């Protein structure tokens, strides 16, 4: 998943944080309207976080703003009225000429709209899965019939001849590619090193950027990046269930390079520090920003390891580090390529479950059948639905939208450098889902 945490550093943001700007002569002058909106937006997000423990995923702005939010729990009704008033203020601001300023205005509008929707949900309003995803994430995932997934399952069935359920045959195959516990950290560190080296060839990161890795248990997610500001992250890896060899690169890229860690570091560098856009010092999880964050993190795996390069890296580095047979890497990733086509099955299970069409047991069974998740992993995924609801669309739909956007701008014959360039521009901008279309 994404990131989280509290204010650990107060940045000299200038106009946005201070409420006024000082010219060369030292005289105070009025703050630009959007900077005032940005400050009020940040404080609203922090205030809503007092009602929803998962809402504020990261914050590294002025510490006193967080302290102020914690000192008084503002009623939800008041927060809803404040959000409505602030939306009207943004609407009254003249449309800027510069593209980045236009994107900033649009960003604040949609983030505020999502905040208002989250307030209504916490007050008890019930939305369908698609209504919720549109309100919170500015996007709706396609609805796919069971027949779509069955076609893929039929192809997989041919890969594992024999009797018994397909999921059992698939799990017997996959069990041969579990990373042993005693090699886990070494495998992850090797994956992180490879992802970082590939990213740094194309993206200039602050010299002080870094992150640490912790192994945790009893979570509804498999990995999480807690961005802490000052170009630093804490990445946690959940070890409740077996970790397969493909998760090393997936998590190293997704949570680290060029995924969440890089995304947040570039926003902090280019938007918070260089432009003074204080709104990017806070990250509300249930907002359109999450689709960009998760979409870029998942697509970033392909950017870092295009074509057959991932399998080559795994054969030469990760399989040996895990004590697995490198000669079987091609076979493993051929099968995983088919399994990856089942990605949207999680959306369908969540849609049916959250809409009340099936109960949690049926949702887990649906995931076992159509997403090929073993029972324990399927049950973990339903716990994720309970906690994060329609957030699930951000991984697969987000990846597809980001891929189409980057590759369209890069061009059909784009080389590696061009693709990285467009990808970095997206990571460093306020662009949101509706602007990817």
Image: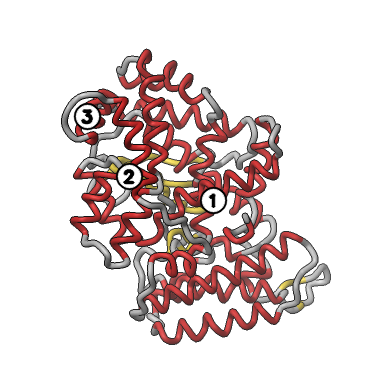
Residue at the outermost left position = 164
For label 3, the crowd category at 10 Å Cα-Cα, with few meaning under 14, some 14 to 19 and many 20 or more, is: some
Q: Which residue is mark 3?
A: 169
Q: Which mark is residue 264?
A: 1
Considering the image in quadrants, where does the C terminus appear?
bottom right
Name the residue located 36 percent from the left edge and 26 percent from the top edge: 187
Name the residue located 45 percent from the left edge and 49 percent from the top edge: 395
Residue 123 as seen in the image, left or right of residue 283: left
Q: Is residue 236 visible?
A: no
Relative to 119, say whether 212 is above or below: above
Residue 41 as seen in the image, left or right of residue 148: right
Relative to 6, say whether 396 is above or below: above
Relative to 417, say whether 377 is above or below: below
Q: Residue 26: x percent and y percent?
A: 78, 72
Element marked by disc 3: helix
Q: Earlier in the sequence, mark 2 or mark 1?
A: 2
Q: Earlier in the sequence, mark 1 or mark 3?
A: 3
Q: CA distance from mark 2 to mark 1?
A: 20 Å
| Number of dots carrying numbers | 3
Image quadrant in which you'd find residue 76: bottom left
Residue 86 as seen in the image, left or right of residue 313: right
Q: Which mark is residue 222?
A: 2
Image quadrant in which you'd find residue 385: bottom left
- Frontmost of labels 1 and 3 is 3
Relative to 262, say whether 180 is above or below: above
For label 2, the crowd category at 10 Å Cα-Cα, with few meaning under 14, some 14 to 19 and many 20 or more, is: many
Q: Is residue 252 visible?
A: yes
Q: Earlier in the sequence, mark 2 or mark 3?
A: 3
Element marked by disc 1: helix
């Amino acid at each position: 998943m994404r990131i989280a945490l509290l204010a650990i550093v107060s940045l000299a943001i200038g106009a946005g944080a201070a409420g006024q700007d000082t010219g060369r002569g030292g005289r105070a002058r009025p703050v630009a309207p959007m900077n005032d909106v940005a400050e009020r937006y940040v404080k609203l997000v922090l205030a809503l976080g007092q009602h929803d423990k998962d809402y504020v995923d990261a914050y590294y702005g002025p510490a006193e703003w967080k302290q102020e939010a914690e000192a008084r729990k503002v009623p939800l009704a008041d927060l809803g009225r404040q959000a409505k008033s602030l939306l009207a203020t943004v609407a009254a601001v003249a449309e800027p000429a510069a593209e980045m300023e236009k994107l900033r205005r649009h960003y604040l509008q949609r983030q505020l709209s999502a905040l208002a929707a989250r307030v209504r949900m916490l007050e008890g309003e019930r939305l369908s899965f698609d209504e919720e995803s549109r309100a919170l994430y500015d996007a709706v995932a396609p609805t796919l019939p069971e027949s779509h997934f069955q076609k893929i399952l039929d192809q997989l069935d041919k890969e594992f001849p024999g009797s018994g359920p397909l999921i059992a045959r698939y799990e017997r195959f996959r069990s041969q590619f579990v990373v042993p516990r005693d090699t886990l950290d070494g495998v992850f560190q090797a994956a992180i090193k490879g992802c970082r080296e590939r990213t740094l060839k194309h993206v200039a990161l602050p010299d002080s950027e870094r992150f640490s890795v912790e192994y945790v248990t009893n979570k509804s997610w498999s990995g999480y990046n807690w961005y802490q500001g000052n170009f630093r992250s804490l990445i946690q890896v959940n070890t409740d269930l077996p970790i397969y060899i493909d998760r090393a690169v997936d998590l190293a890229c997704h949570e680290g390079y060029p995924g969440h860690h890089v995304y947040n570091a570039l926003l902090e560098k280019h938007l918070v520090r260089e432009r003074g856009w204080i709104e990017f010092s806070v990250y509300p999880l249930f907002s359109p920003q999450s689709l960009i964050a998760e979409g870029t993190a998942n697509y970033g795996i392909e950017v870092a390891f295009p074509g057959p390069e991932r399998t080559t890296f795994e054969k030469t580095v990760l399989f040996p580090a895990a004590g697995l047979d490198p000669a079987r890497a091609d076979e493993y990733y051929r099968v995983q390529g088919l399994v990856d086509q089942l990605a949207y099955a999680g959306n369908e299970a969540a849609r049916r479950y959250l809409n009340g069409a099936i109960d949690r047991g049926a949702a887990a069974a649906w995931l076992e059948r159509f997403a090929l998740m073993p029972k324990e992993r399927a049950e973990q995924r339903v716990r994720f639905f309970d906690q994060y609801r329609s957030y699930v669309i951000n991984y697969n739909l987000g990846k597809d939208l980001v891929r189409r956007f980057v590759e369209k701008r890069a061009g059909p014959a784009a080389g590696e450098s061009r693709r990285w360039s467009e990808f970095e521009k997206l990571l460093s901008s306020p662009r949101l889902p509706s602007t990817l279309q």
